Image (cartoon, grey):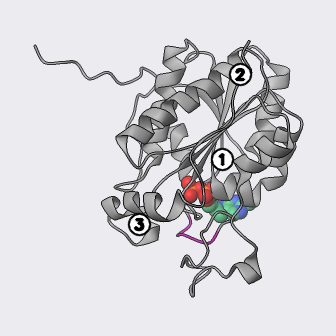
Amino acid sequence: MAMKRKVPEMIDKPMNFCPGCGHGIVIRLICEVLEEVGQDKNVIFPIGVGCSSNLGGGLTADRFHCPHGRASAVATGMKRVSPENIIVSYQGDGDAYSIGIAETINAAYRNEKITVITVNNTNFGMTGGQMSWTTMPNQKTTTSQLGRDCEVTGVPIKFPEMVASQFNPAYVARGSVHTPGEINKLKKYIKNAIEAQVNGEGYSLVEVLSPCPVNWGMSPIKAMERIATDLVPYYPLGELKQREAK
Ligand SMILES: Cc1ncc(C[n+]2csc(CCOP(=O)(O)OP(=O)(O)O)c2C)c(N)n1
């Protein structure tokens, strides 16, 4: 008998991502985890502006499409008003770390009991691939046509490192989607982040390195390879702050 393919119940429509985009993988993992920990009917997603917004179109879950960059502030309000709900913000790097960096830092600083998932594809994907704070040194984008000059722009931000070393979060990790093995590890990171919130342990953050083949001007396979060769050496993978044993 043929195996039945199991898609999480909360995914009820296809989402519109470019071929080879990583967003769909990340969203699938989040939904699988929420179902496994029994929170799929209890979650609310504050969603950023960008390709990340497509999450809103494909799920049955409650969600709120926030003003650009402000999802951490919205998440804070949701959690404080309704602490029994699980609040998972879903944002791109441009949204969370460039446009909304103040809100993103402030929620982490206050150790809000929310989960923040940021998809780092090293550019503003939806609007055509402009430079963001995570664009790599010398990377060509539509607004850094000669390559990112860090003398002029500063260096790419390592937000998880900053949160893990300067604040007091419950859990911080950086994962990636560029191999099946990394996807499995990423799922464990997302599970820890959401379980930390379920247990009221404090702020949890997972950054995901994710390909953007169209704006990187690469095939989907080359874009996955670029993560391994160019991004991982600068943005190391793994847990930056582990949960304390309860
Ligand atoms: C206040 C405001 N400024 C700018 C925009 C235009 N805008 C829409 S999506 C986007 C880029 C989002 O990039 P990122 O957060 O990295 O997400 P991605 O699309 O790469 O997933 C921008 C600049 C907007 N919608 N609102």
Would you say the residues marked 3 and 2 are in contact, meaning their CB atoms lie under 8 Å apart? no
Would you say the residues marked 2 and 1 are in contact, meaning their CB atoms lie under 8 Å apart? no
Measure the alpha-carbon separation of dots 3 and 2: 35 Å
Residue under numbered circle 2: 197
Q: Main secondary structure of the magenta part?
A: loop
Measure the alpha-carbon separation of dots 3 and 1: 20 Å
N-term mark: 3 or 2: 2
The magenta-colored residue range is 127-131
Q: Do we see residue 67 in this rendering? A: no
How far across and how far down the image is residue 189, in percent? Answer: 57, 32
* Nearest to the observer: residue 125 or residue 190: 190
Dot 2 lies on which element?
A: helix
Report the amino acid beneath label 1: Gly
How far across and how far down the image is residue 124, in percent? Answer: 59, 64
Say above or below: 130 vs 46.
below
Per the rendering, the mark at residue 48 is 1
Report the amino acid beneath label 3: Val
N-term mark: 2 or 1: 1
Per the rendering, the mark at residue 214 is 3
Residue located at (42% from left, 20% from top): 9
Q: Is mark 1 within 8 Å of ligand 1?
A: yes
Q: Per the image, is 80 magenta?
A: no
Name the front one of labels 3 and 2: 2
